[in-house]
Image: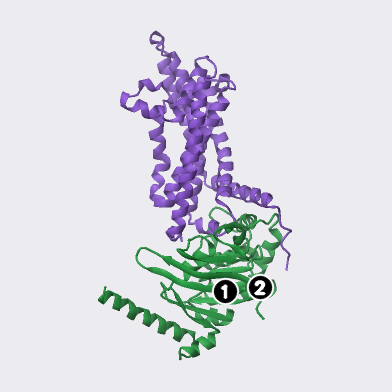
Amino acid sequence: MTPVTPALSPRARSWLRMRAIARRHAYVLVRSPHRLFDVTLWPLVDVVLFGSLAAFVGTNQASGASKASGYLLAGIVLWHVIYQSQIAMSTGLLEETWTRNLLNLMVTPLREVEYLGGVALFGMVKLVIGVGVMVIGALAFFSFHTWSLGFGLVPIVAVLLVVGWAISLFVMGLVLRFGTGAEALAWGVMFVLLPLSGVFYPTKALPALMQPLALALPTTHAFTALRSLVDHRGSDWPQLTIAAAGSLAMLGLAMWFLVAMLRTFRRRGYITRYT
Amino acid sequence: MPGEVVLEARGLIKDYSRARAVDGIDITVHAGERVALLGPNGAGKTTTLFMILGVVAPDGGSVSVCGFDLARHRSQAAECIGFAAGYLPLTERMRVNEYLRLYGQLYGLADPDPRITEGLDRFRISHLANAMGTELSSGQRTLIGIVRSTLHQPKLLILDEPTASLDPDVALRVREGLIDVANNEGTALLMTSHDMTDVEQVCERVLFLSQGRIVADGTPASIAESFGRGNLEGVFLHLAADREIATSQQTDHP
């Protein structure tokens, strides 16, 4: 009988479990070529679409629309920070439900926070690949230097990352509560957020009824700050502060929701949906 | 003389919207003990196991594993438990050794490889180490699942119908492997099965469940005797018939 190796410290075990989950999802990506489209082809398609639109709009100098070309390209690249972080996390849990693997994981010592940490860890890898492809595509096809926007991008990216995680936690909660039928939300919620967040335009362009809703979203303030960078006006700290506070509040709310849904999941025995 | 208590469940209750699935179950399992949880479909076996595993929250009662209260220290309790079931899939898109390494690490083993080799040898499936999960037969998947559940030398191994749908040869290997785990590693077994051969060969103690309650607790022979039947299968059929009568009475008199 081989003795089990001496016990690691609780922190080391936690880190080991997170890396194990990240590696598990790396296998899923590498061995499902169609999933590579999410981090390579589709981001590139978005760059070509919005870059071409930007090039067309930018030719209309008379209306001052050349500014819009920067908004479009910077907007779509930064939008993918939310999109990739959200999709990576949400599909992480969905993968476990699609393959009926949830019970396998839930009977192990893996804590919920470790699972989320592992999925987020690998999600960061996907994010870097996906956004990296877009940055390179924008430069190669449209000579748009994303990094010319400077270090002011860092807090904007951080806010968008947190919002992406918050949305994914909310989607996960819905999947636990309502089953895989709720998975449409993983994608659908992004289509709602995209126009409301003023990713490509100031929210003044939205119908008046929707403007208060848009202003309540942290993403709206993050993209306003982004346009300030595109316009060479430097970092818009008031907008960034609102965005940061809003994103943290959103994350806290999403965590509370997920914990509540997990409790319901255990109380009602929903694990039997996946056995 | 019984060893240390590895599982103590007290007054477990679980209500689902249509019925009470588990109705005040008490179970104590000692180190190295081999216990079967038997009963007809719908008796509450799997729900009981899920409550012991912490994936379903009981509506009443408590579970303690290796001294850890499951409600407050689920992760520590889970480190003492292994779980395998005939219906559990292997994680997709992974080779067998990758899969076993993943779960070894989830159980906190920094270097699970020696235990993986030993586990595969025990069930005579070392040749499957590099196979993809999708290439395996259902019997092979079950064996891999049991290897996974024993990697961390659990004090309590829970098995839900481990030999369901297996051919006699693989079922025999499962039984021999489980007895080996219990004898050599001091692991207690708590298993459900509809195969009375499994139970009579592997388990020294049987808990019979009917309509969410334990109706008998003893050795296979003593239980058969107390119900006036020749063997466990006779007891099983007797309880299943009782349940049908009870169900039809409920239908007649709602």
Q: Residue at x 43, y 73 (%)?
A: B212
Residue A34 seen in this snapshot: no
Mark 2: give few (<14), some (14-19) or many (20+) Cα within 10 Å. Answer: few
Circle 2: element type? loop
Q: Give the quadrant of the C terminus of chain B.
A: bottom left
**B218 w.r.t. B159: above or below:** below
The residue drawn where x is 39% and y is 28% is A214
Label number found at residue A229: none
Query: What color is chain B drawn in?
Result: green
The residue drawn where x is 58% and y is 66% is B64
Give me the chain letter of mark 2.
Answer: B
Q: Chain of mark 1?
A: B
Cβ–Cβ below 8 Å for labels 1 and 2? no
Q: Where residue B179 appears, x then y in whole percent?
A: 63, 76
Q: Position of residue B104 (x, y in %)?
A: 64, 58
Q: Gap in Å between the C-alphas at discs 1 and 2?
A: 10 Å
Left or right of B122? Residue B209 is left
Chain A on-screen colour: purple
Q: Is the residue at mark 1 from the same chain as the one at mark 2?
A: yes
Residue furthest to the top in view is A62
Circle 1 sits on which residue?
A: B28
- Amino acid type, residue under disc 2 in the picture: Glu
Of the two numbered discs 1 and 2 on the same chain, state the one appearing first in sequence. 2
Q: Which residue is the site of mark 2?
A: B4
- What amino acid is found at the position of numbered circle 1 in the picture? Thr
Residue B220 coordinates in the image, percent (x, y): 53, 84
Q: Nearer the viewer, residue A241 or A35?
A: A241
Quadrant containing the N terminus of chain B in the rendered view: bottom right
Of residues B191 and B197, the one nearer the viewer is: B191
